[in-house]
Image: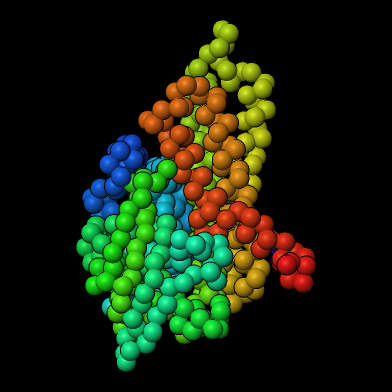
């Protein structure tokens, strides 16, 4: 199979536009993101003007209708500037699950919701996790019952990103693709997805004090007889589990790229630092022990970067009808597993080279290490990634 590692002129032009904005307006303020637990409105508005929130959305809803690789190019520049990963969460969740909403949502839903989401006026998130159900999606308890042209939802979702922003920060609010049972007797075949606006009557929420990624909110919400119109259903009744699995693949590929870019950026920052920092009369960059660690870290980060783009390329192939759904799952799981484990190791090593300075909250590597730890669980635990890989390599009959 021939490979081409070159980005197109359109992709590089878009990269440059996002990089110029990110370096000027995002990078100088990342410590502020953590301290204030908030991304300033003007940054969200600036990204919206660059059309980054609608990059994969269909043109008929005001999006750019570009492919996942191009979306990855934008994510690269966001992560390079914001090593807290707060904006990465905002972008990759909205991009991956917004695409799923555009693929399976109705025309009426698209005209009402996606036209706002593509312009960055409304944010789309994902809500599958519950207090007793994380990677075991079938363990959810939330339910919906139909009443005429509406569904009435009850239940609780936990550890969800973007709750506050979907309520108060985006001009037209936002909501989450929310997985519930519409027929619990059918088990996973009885799950259905709905878009649930966070400003709906019957929603109550609680914010958590997360360990990292503090600029983007994280918490729980309860649904008490929340009514959503029929056209807010995403896909057919009983197809929610399968749609969720597809969405997770998209999100995992973007997570992999974010972690790989975070690793690469950490090495760039640390490499410059160790050229200046001296010990025993010479820059510590001259010590072979550091050089050996650097070489291994660079190779691993580069491998993770290429695996992430391979996963995004596989998703692009699937969209074009050229790749199998389970092949995509394998590559997305492998990319996420390798990139997350690599990022934790690479960033930790780079911090050690930087000494005590690395253990301050002004150091972007310290902020990044706390952020990448979240991906041990987000969009599926690393152990689940291993099971997916093994299932596709060995065959389902060898997996319990």
Instruction: State the image coordinates of residue 290 (x, y, percent, origin top left).
Output: 63, 24
Q: Quadrant of the N terminus?
A: bottom right
Q: Is residue 280 above or below residue 171?
A: above
Instruction: State the image coordinates of residue 134 (x, y, percent, origin top left).
Output: 52, 61
User: In the depicted view, which residue is nearer to us: 106 or 220?
Assistant: 220
For this view, does 38 lie left or right of residue 333?
A: left
Residue at position x 58%, y 72% from top? 318
Q: Is residue 31 above or below residue 398?
A: above
Residue at position x 52%, y 51% from top? 375
Q: Quadrant of the C terminus?
A: bottom right
Instruction: State the image coordinates of residue 45 (x, y, percent, origin top left).
Output: 25, 55
Q: Is residue 140 above or below residue 169?
A: below
Q: Is residue 95 visible?
A: no
Q: Is residue 131 above or below residue 343?
A: below
Instruction: State the image coordinates of residue 35 (x, y, percent, origin top left).
Output: 30, 38
Residue at position x 21%, y 63% from top? 171
Q: Is residue 154 visible?
A: yes
């Amino acid at each position: 199979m021939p490979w081409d590692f070159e980005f197109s002129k359109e992709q590089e032009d878009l990269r440059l536009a996002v990089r110029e904005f990110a370096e000027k307006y995002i990078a100088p303020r990342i410590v502020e993101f953590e301290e204030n637990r908030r991304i300033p409105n003007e940054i969200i508005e600036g990204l919206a003007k660059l059309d980054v929130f609608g990059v994969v959305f269909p043109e008929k809803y005001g999006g750019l209708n570009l492919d996942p690789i191009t979306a990855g190019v934008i994510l690269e520049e966001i992560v390079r500037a914001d090593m807290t990963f707060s904006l990465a969460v905002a972008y990759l969740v909205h991009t991956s699950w917004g695409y799923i909403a555009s693929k399976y949502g109705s025309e009426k839903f698209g005209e009402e919701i996606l036209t706002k989401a593509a312009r960055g006026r409304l944010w789309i998130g994902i809500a599958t996790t519950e207090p007793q159900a994380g990677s075991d999606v079938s363990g959810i308890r939330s339910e919906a019952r139909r009443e005429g042209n509406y569904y009435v939802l009850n239940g609780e979702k936990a550890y969800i990103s973007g709750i506050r922003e979907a309520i108060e920060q985006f001009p037209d609010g936002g909501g989450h693709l929310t997985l519930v049972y519409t027929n619990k007797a059918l088990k996973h075949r009885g799950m259905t997805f709905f878009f649930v606006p966070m400003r709906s009557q019957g929603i109550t929420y609680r914010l958590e004090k997360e360990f990292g990624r503090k600029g983007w909110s994280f918490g729980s919400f309860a649904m008490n007889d929340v009514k959503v119109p029929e056209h807010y259903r995403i896909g057919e009744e009983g197809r929610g589990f399968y749609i969720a699995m597809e969405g997770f693949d998209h999100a995992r590929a973007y997570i992999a790229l974010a972690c790989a870019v975070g690793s690469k950026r950490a090495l760039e920052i640390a490499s410059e630092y160790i050229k200046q920092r001296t010990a025993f009369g010479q820059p510590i960059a001259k010590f072979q022990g550091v050089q050996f660690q650097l070489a291994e870290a660079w190779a691993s980060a580069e491998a993770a970067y290429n695996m992430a783009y391979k996963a995004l390329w596989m998703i692009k192939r699937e969209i074009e009808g050229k790749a199998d759904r389970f092949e995509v799952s394998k590559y997305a799981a492998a990319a996420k597993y390798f990139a997350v484990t690599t990022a934790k190791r690479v960033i930790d090593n780079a911090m050690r080279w930087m000494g005590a300075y690395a253990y301050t909250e002004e150091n972007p590597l310290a902020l990044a290490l706390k952020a990448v730890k979240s991906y041990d669980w987000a969009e599926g635990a690393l152990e689940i990634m291993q099971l997916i890989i093994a299932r596709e390599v060995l065959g389902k009959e060898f997996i319990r």
